[in-house]
Amino acid sequence: MSTNSADLSKSNKDVECLEKAECIGSPDSLETAPCDSSSKNEHGKQPLQGLKLASHEVLERAQLTGRLKCSKCNGSRMFYCYTCFSLVGVSQQEIPTIKLPIKVDIIKHPNETDGKSTAVHAKLIAPHDVTIYTYPCIPEYEGERHTVALVFPGPGSVTVEEMSKRLIEIDQRRSLSSQEELCSKRAKHDNEAKDTGSAEGRPRDCPLQRVVFIDSTWNQTNKIITDERLQALVQVELKTRKTCFWRHQKGSPDTYLATIEAIYYFLKDYHEQCLAQEYQGEYDNLLFFYAYLHQLINKAKHSAGKL
Ligand SMILES: [Zn+2]
């Protein structure tokens, strides 16, 4: 990573905080995007407040210890290694782990500076459900169109609620055509026909099993998004959220979320709109690292008189 080697033994604690945060987030500029209170955000001006998070004590302790060498790549890291997706100076038992209702695939741009990415946060907190791929090595989603969605804004993108309907339609078309195929091959019994109609009258469950995110800067995503392997997927946009990312990218709309924010908001919408369950903080810990780093940078900016 290209950041200056911060001397963590400096006496000024706030400078230390800022430097540490910079080393982790590797921000181009520390301009924090204002968390717009006019946006649809349940937590008003401070959307990261009120989250049900595990104690940050473990991170505070690791911060005091300072940067350590990653046992796999030898890189100097704090909390985690963004290259190896493993924890550094913190054990897996000390941080929260959550189970997600669907699988999450994250596609990284190969030129993306790893230290800037928040994708690793998802992998560390939900290790069994999150997979990170480096473009162009991505999975084939052919034949799974009815169970996969891609989160990316665009002219053809739909809301999470609409996504559910779209996937059900694709699934129905798919099963219809396979039924027709069956019919043409062999005569169907009356009983079988009755069985297929039994779901009528009640809303169908959302068939979504996997959601894909692109982890890349605003202007590097084009190559990935135009890849034909992703073209056929239902595209979802999280329209009402505004970022709190401290490295707000110049020229990008303020609805352009950090990857971990996008994953969090998507799952929250999925929980409420597709699973039709009340959200009770089930996925808040996805923001365990993010909230800590955000708070660290804000604290340092406050004392530097920048906020
Ligand atoms: Zn490493």
Image: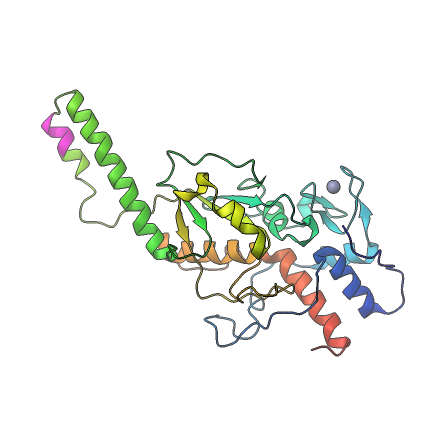
> Magenta part of the protein: which range?
189-193
Image-based side of 155 in relation to 227, left or right: left
What residue is at 22 percent from the left and 49 percent from the top?
A: 202
Image-based side of 118 in relation to 11, left or right: left
Which residue is more in the foreground, 19 or 99? 19
Where, by quadrant of the figure, is residue 180 drawn?
A: top left
Image-based side of 7 in relation to 261, left or right: right
x%, y% of residue 87? 71, 45
User: Which quadrant of the figure contains the C terminus?
Assistant: bottom right
Q: Quadrant of ligand 1?
A: top right
x%, y% of residue 279? 44, 59
Which residue is more in the foreground, 107 or 90? 107
x%, y% of residue 21? 74, 61
What residue is at 56 percent from the left and 57 percent from the top?
A: 218
Q: Main secondary structure of the magenta part?
A: helix
Q: Can residue 211 be seen by looking at this rendering?
A: yes
230 vs 2: above or below = above
Which residue is more in the foreground, 283 or 122? 122
Reply yes or no: does residue 140 show up in magenta. Answer: no
69 vs 180: above or below = below
277 vs 107: above or below = below
Which residue is more in the foreground, 108 or 307? 108
What residue is at 82 percent from the left and 58 percent from the top?
A: 64
Q: Can residue 54 be seen by looking at this rendering?
A: no
Q: Residue furthest left?
A: 190
**Number of numbered markers:** 0
x%, y% of residue 93? 67, 45
What residue is at 31 percent from the left and 49 percent from the top?
A: 166
Image-based side of 133 in relation to 190, left or right: right
Colouring used for the render: rainbow
